[in-house]
Structures are given as C-alpha cells and as structure tokens.
Image: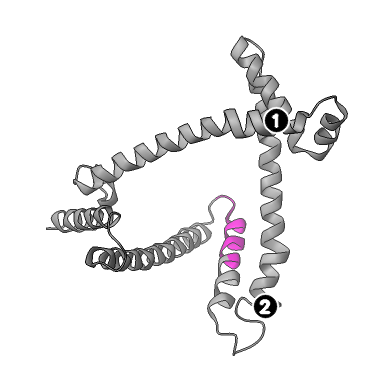
Amino acid sequence: MRTTVPIVVAFISGVVLVVAFFFRDNSLIGSFRQEFTVWLSIIGGFTLLLGVVSIVRVNLTAVARRKDAWPYRILTLISVFAMAIPAVLPESWSPLFGRSNGSIYDWLFTNMQSPMMSTMFATLAFYIASAAYRAFRARSAEATLLLITASLVMLWRVPLGEAFLNLLPGHWTEWLNTYIMNGANMSVQRGIIIGAALGAASMSLRIILGIERMYMGKG
C-alpha cells in the first residue's frame, strides 16, 4: 500500500498534465491541470520548509558535537533566522519588519547577501578562466579552433577586449555576434537543450509508469 498509492498518484498526475497540454484552460481537463499546478506550488513550499528544517537540524547537531568548523555553522544558523524571521513578520508591527525598503530583510540582502553573491561569482569566473587556460591547448586542429574561438569570445565579452577589436579593420564584433554567438554557439545550445528535454521526458515517462521509484527512496 505504501508503494502503490504514490505510484497511482504519480501516474494520474502525470497523465493529466500531459493530456491537458492539448486542451484549453476552460475545459474540464484544463481545470484539472490548474488544480494540479496549485498543488505543485503547495508541495514545493513544503519542500522548502523541509530544507530549512534540515539545514537547521544538521547545523545544530554539528555545533552541539563541536565538529569541524562549528563556529561557521553558528553563523549559518544566525543568518538563516536573521533572514527568515523579519521576512514572515507583518510590517504593521514595525517598519523594520517585512521585506519593504529600509527593513531588516532589505538591509541584510543589500549589504550582505548581494556583495557575497558578487564575490562568489567573481571567484567562480577566476577559476573558470584559469581552468580554460589549462584546458585550451593547441594539440590538434579541433583544439586550436576551440582556442581561437574562446579567445575571441572572451576578448569580446570584456570592455578592454571590445575596444581592442574595434581598432582592427572590419566589423569583428558584429562578425562574432552573428556567426559565433548566434550561429555556432546557438546551434550547440539548442542541441544540448533538445538532449536535456529528451532525457527529462524519458525520466518523466519512467516515473509515470512506475519504473523509476527513487522519489520514494527505492531504486
């Protein structure tokens, strides 16, 4: 029973959402799709709550047992509650609560989270550039072509490189945008998207038919 009911629910939900794609929203099947979409949002909200409870429990256990880097886990817990509590309290209590301009949530997001996100992405960009430098070796004709293309694209994406390309004769920036970014790059991206869509469709079909049961903790 514990296995049959989830499989039946997944089968009915999947079939209704697939069939409803071919019907209008004001039809009976379309109304079922809208209802299932609402339930999907509700379940997604509960999964977020489960994630918050899980990260709090894991970090509390690590702090209680004095595991490695436990002071940083205390900072994680403080950050979670500092962002969560002001966001759920009503603004009528105080202008500092809620998510409006000038609130605690807004100050923490603007002055702490945004700079940390910028720092993280800047660090990732540095490691990506260093990894690309090590990976792009002109050992074959294909690798040489990749090296030249990547160098031109990286030059085009930074203001200094764009200014340098504009000094060269011809319209290098327009050529890069037309033939590389909107031509070769776009075709490769679409191929990857098609492959990912086929993989998602096959996985969805396996879940609907009850072949894939990893969502129930079973293989």
Q: CA distance from mark 1 to mark 2?
A: 45 Å
Residue 74 in view here = yes
- Whether 27 is among the magenta residues is no
Q: Is residue 5 above or below residue 185?
A: below
Residue 176 tag number: 1
The mark nearer the N terminus, 1 or 2, is: 2
Magenta: main secondary structure equals helix
Crowdedness of circle 1 by 10 Å Cα count: few (<14), some, many (20+)? Answer: some
Task: Report whether 217 appears left or right of 179.
Answer: left
In the picture as drawn, the residue positioned furthest to the bottom comes out as 92
Q: Nearer the viewer, mark 1 or mark 2?
A: 1
The quarter in which the C terminus is drawn is top left
The magenta span reads 68-79
Q: Residue at x 22, y 53 (%)?
A: 15
Q: Disc 1 residue type? A: Leu
Q: Residue at x 28, y 64 (%)?
A: 30
Q: In the rendering, at what x and y percent does residue 18 appear?
A: 27, 52
Q: In the rendering, at what x and y percent does residue 105 appear?
A: 64, 73
Q: Is residue 167 above or below residue 95?
A: above
